Image: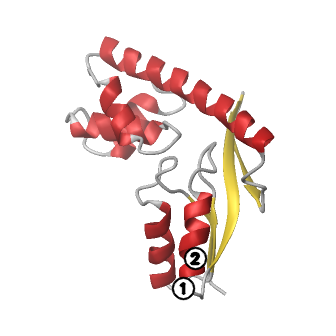
Amino acid sequence: MKYDLHLHTTASDGRLNPSALVDLARARGLEVIAITDHDSVGGVSEALEAAGREPGIVVIPGVEINTDLASGELHILGYFIDYRDANLGRALEKIRESRVGRAQKMVKRLRELGMPVEWSRVQDMAHGESICRPHIAQALLEKGFVGSEREAFDKYIGRNGPA
């Protein structure tokens, strides 16, 4: 059986909307996928609908929640969640709000470092509910401040980066 249990859609930092991601997974021969966007279940319903239009693939509703530890980050993946649960929705919304604050501070710090990235552009790149560091990396790349998203993380927005 072919599966991928850690996929992101445009509801967080993925490049494809949920329907397109399901179509790609199906085209690549995957039989089971889990939609595990960062702090969001916004892509789950659409992915389930897309999977239901044509048999051959199962979508597991999931979520990824990150937390910081003294030694690094911990990524927690939840599977078979009740993505419609109001309490879960409120908890994820609070986490997303803290992500926005962190991202705004990063953009401010990048300006101070001589790399003026526009907050509005970062928001535009974040098509979904969650604003994540890859959106800031994309904005840095677009402005020519870095040669790749990896470089943005390595030099500026990674865990120990100046921004």
**Residue at point 80% right, 39% down?**
87
- Would residue 119 be found to the left or right of residue 74 on screen? left
**Residue at point 61% right, 61% down?**
45
Three-letter residue code for mark 1: Glu
For the residues bearing labels 1 and 2, Cβ distance under 8 angstroms: yes
Residue 152 seen in the current view = no
Q: Which numbered circle lies on residue 51?
A: 2
- Numbered disc 1: secondary structure: loop
Three-letter residue code for mark 2: Ala
Residue 12, percent from left and from top:
51, 47
70 or 88: nearer the viewer: 88
Q: Which residue is mark 1?
A: 54
Residue 97, percent from left and from top:
59, 27
**Residue at point 50% right, 76% down?**
25
**Residue at point 64% right, 42% down?**
39
- Would residue 81 be found to the left or right of residue 24 on screen? right
Residue 81 seen in the current view = yes
From what the image shows, is residue 64 above or below residue 4? Answer: above
From what the image shows, is residue 54 above or below residue 107? Answer: below
Residue 38, percent from left and from top:
60, 46
Marks 1 and 2, how far apart in space? Answer: 6 Å
Residue 110, percent from left and from top:
35, 20
From what the image shows, is residue 87 above or below residue 115? Answer: below
